[in-house]
Amino acid sequence: MFTKVVSIALLTVFVQAVFASKCTRTYVVKENDICDSISKENNASTYQLAVVNHGVIDAACTKLVPGQQICLGRAGEDCTTTYVVNDGDTCDDIQAKSGVNATLLYSNNPQINEGCTNIYIGEVLCVAKTVVVPAVPSHGASSVVVPPATAIPANPGATAVHPSVHPSATPTPTHLNVNNNNDDDLPFCDEL
Ligand SMILES: *[C@@H]1O[C@H](CO)[C@@H](O)[C@H](O)[C@H]1NC(C)=O
Ligand SMILES: *[C@@H]1O[C@H](CO)[C@@H](O)[C@H](O)[C@H]1NC(C)=O
């Protein structure tokens, strides 16, 4: 039983690696672009832009080259419903404004840490009503998307762990079940 589960998980990773879907939206980098300005203008979240360009754009997005063509979204994994983080925003605020629950917000933005203390002003989040972004890469969300050096935390005082995401000292993994692709990539663990 255990072996079977592991095999299926490995097969899933393999299938995703081999059959990564086709890029369906592209963008040509302009002078003075930064990743989050591209994300904002084109409704492609910070996480999505980083994942679909992994290996092309570095994690902190410091090496964009004007004229370079990048991918904005891949077929079937393209979240075009986005929200730009404002000063003072908490994940609760964003959920309320966007009409999504914590499960969806964290599944579509797996770089957000457990207490939602790492969101920053200008970060572009996917606030779609279904899970639509690419799966978390095997090396973890935090290795693919790193806040820019100039990032200003949206909510420096935030320390509370979201009660609906981590209701007790032994968090249940139910909130991750929305996206079965992520079984082996518990996004929060990377941030601890
Ligand atoms: C991004 O989304 C906004 C709000 O839905 C919309 O007004 C705008 O046209 C979209 N831009 C692009 C490039 O899709
Ligand atoms: C979050 O919203 C989605 C979509 O509406 C729903 O399927 C899911 O059950 C909700 N999860 C929780 C924990 O409320």
Image: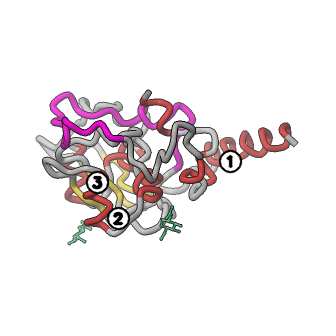
Q: Residue at position x 62%, y 47% from top?
A: 16
Q: Is residue 126 above or below residue 51?
A: below
Residue 180 or residue 144, whichever sits in front: 180
| Residue 75 in sight | no
Q: Residue at position x 29%, y 31% from top?
A: 60
Residue 153 or residue 73, whichever sits in front: 153
Image color mode: secondary structure
Please name which of the two marks, 1 or 3, marks the residue nearer to the observer.
1
Q: Which residue, given by chain and number where applicable, does mark 3 sit on?
A: 27
**Residue 37 as seen in the image, left or right of residue 2:** left
| Residue 37 in sight | yes
Where in the figure is residue 82, as x and y percent of width and height? 29, 61
The amino acid beneath tag 3 is: Tyr
Q: What is the chief secondary structure element of the magenta stretch?
A: loop
Mark 2 vs 3, N-terminal side:
3
How crowded pointer 3 is (Cα within 10 Å; few <14, some 14-19, many 20+) is rated as some
Where is the N terminus found, in terms of image quarters?
A: top right
Q: For the magenta stretch, what is the residue range?
A: 135-160
Helix, strand or loop under label 1: helix
Helix, strand or loop under label 2: loop
How crowded pointer 1 is (Cα within 10 Å; few <14, some 14-19, many 20+) is rated as few
The amino acid beneath tag 1 is: Val
Distance CA(mark 2)–CA(mark 3)? 14 Å
Distance CA(mark 1)–CA(mark 2)? 25 Å
Q: Which residue, given by chain and number where applicable, does mark 2 sit on?
A: 80
Where in the figure is residue 121, as x and y percent of width and height? 17, 45
Q: Is residue 141 above or below residue 75?
A: above
**Residue 146 as seen in the image, left or right of residue 30:** right
Q: Is residue 143 magenta?
A: yes
Q: Which residue, given by chain and number where applicable, does mark 1 sit on?
A: 15
